[in-house]
Amino acid sequence: MKDLAVLYVQQFKTTFASMLQYRASLFIWMIGSVLEPLVYLVVWSTVTISHGGSVGDYTAAQFAAYFIVLMLVNQVTYTWIMYEYEYRIREGLLSPALLRPVHPIHADISDNISSKLVSMPVMLVIAAGLAVLFKPTATFLPWTILAFIPALFLAFLVRFLIEWTLAQSAFWTTRVGAINQVYFVLVLFLSGQIAPLSLFPMPIQILANILPFRWMIGFPVELILGRLSPTQALTGLGAQLIWLVISLGLVRIVWRAGIRIYSAVGA
Amino acid sequence: MNYLRLFGVYFRLSVMGELAYRVNFYVQLFQSLVELATALTGLAVIFSYTDNLAGWNPNEMLALVGVYFITGGIIGLVIQPSLEQFITSVRDGTLDFTLVKPEDAQFLMSFQVVNIWKLIDIVMGFAVLTTALIRLGNKVAAGQAVNFGLMLVTGTVIIYSFWVILASLSFWFVRVENILVIFQSMYEAGRWPISLYPGWLRFALTFIVPVAFATTVPAEALTGRLTGNTLLGAMAAACVLLAASRLCWRMGLQRYSGASA
């Protein structure tokens, strides 16, 4: 445990420095993650106008709060590991990582967190700007803020582990593009990115509760906006823990199987 | 005429190259179908709560999705792959080989790579558009069809010029791939009618990254919303941008000195 802490400190030092070098690219990549929730925010506010002021249990101002918080939660939890792995395996760049005496996932986690530390201040400024433009309303209760912290942390871990597992598919096929696309579509609809899940028909909502996607993005957003009862919040945290265990297992199994068939391409 | 023949050669070359990888056809077909299904499901969710979005009814929105796929397909067919190749060639110096050829270098580098599978998107876009028009019921007047064709060409010219200007930046800065990402993120916003957005975003999508001309404006022409002012404005914008892109290309080329020894 102590060794791992030392390892993370060193990893952070190096990855943070390298992320600072790439800050221009980081900000450019950010445009997409701002624009998507912004577009759906605009679409749903327009729908509320023609629908007598509210859609489902959301007013225009509540949609604004939902999508601005969603943008921030998505920023905290997103990964780009699937693109990264395809490149690593195609170019044989995984080999040096295998020589290290620790599991390569630790380097990836600190990479991810460092890039968020660099980009988060900008994202918060953008969120504040959007708040001025769209005038969201939300009430934050002390207990929801308290419960939001573990929910966000678990959401990050579950999303990271699941996407890391999916990234391993590059061991077996060179056509990961199609796999990734299907995954992104599922995330788009079932995590609450296109609309709050309560606006979907019941069967879809049940499906979203079973699958991991809601627990990676939608759940922390609904939680901090006070849309869940304490029981629902606890059940949600429980679902996140279950998915954490499942995804940890998946990481182990898939990594072991993948590494066996990996034969370095390149020099 | 000579240019058309040259484009034909590039096209034939990439068809021959790609036919070796026939599975790519099915992969691309699958990906395009998933993308279309996503767009349609998204619309279905939204239109389950309303019957018009900023004045566009479901069938008109369907037409817009069709146009979005057509222009997206045209960009992906030749503009994007060619200009990405161009940016790489400035960095590693292989642009030299293009420059020594006895044809206009801007033409050669703009059409050098053809991603033929993007034809699937174009065909699919026209199928969606036709479905939308049949469901709209009222016949499309000849004038509207002509305007649509005109606006589709104008939109493509505007997007092409915009890409050339961005790509020409690679003469000054080494890494510009990321700037192209800005365009791709903003193009997604073109799936929705531009009138939906607040003023500042509408301005950005019209004048800074001219996505509106590629999707909303041609769809407006088909659904009979196009005003004379927009029509003339779009054509003027196309001429100005085309001239500007030529100028940027020329200025950039003067700075080019070959990257390798």
Image: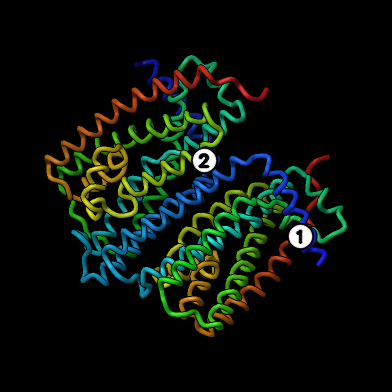
Report the Cα–Cα distance between label 2 and label 1: 31 Å
Of the numbered discs in the image, which one, if any, rests on residue A177? 2
Amino acid marked by disc 2:
Gly
Of the numbered discs in the image, which one, if any, rests on residue A163? none
Residue at image location 33% in from the left, 45% down from the top: A73
Q: Pick whichever, B247 or B98, lies toward us.
A: B98
Q: What is the quadrant of residue A76 in the picture? A: top left
Q: Position of residue B88 (x, y in %)?
A: 70, 46
**Disc 2 versus disc 1: nearer the observer:** 2
Q: For numbered disc 1, what is the local secondary structure?
A: helix
Q: Position of residue B100 (x, y in %)?
A: 87, 52
Amino acid marked by disc 1:
Gln
Q: Which residue is mark 1?
A: B106
Compared to residue B155, the image places residue A208 above or below, namely above
Q: For numbered disc 2, what is the local secondary structure?
A: helix
Q: Position of residue A213 (x, y in %)?
A: 32, 40
Q: Pick whichever, B150 or B105, lies toward us.
A: B150
Compared to residue B142, the image places residue A238 above or below, namely above
Q: Within 10 Å of the Cα at label 1, are there few (<14), some (14-19), or many (20+) other Cα atoms?
A: some
Q: Within 10 Å of the Cα at label 2, are there few (<14), some (14-19), or many (20+) other Cα atoms?
A: some
Give the quarter of the figure containing the C terminus of chain B.
top right
Q: Locate residue A224 relative to residue B57 in the image: left or right.
A: left
The chain carrying label 1 is B
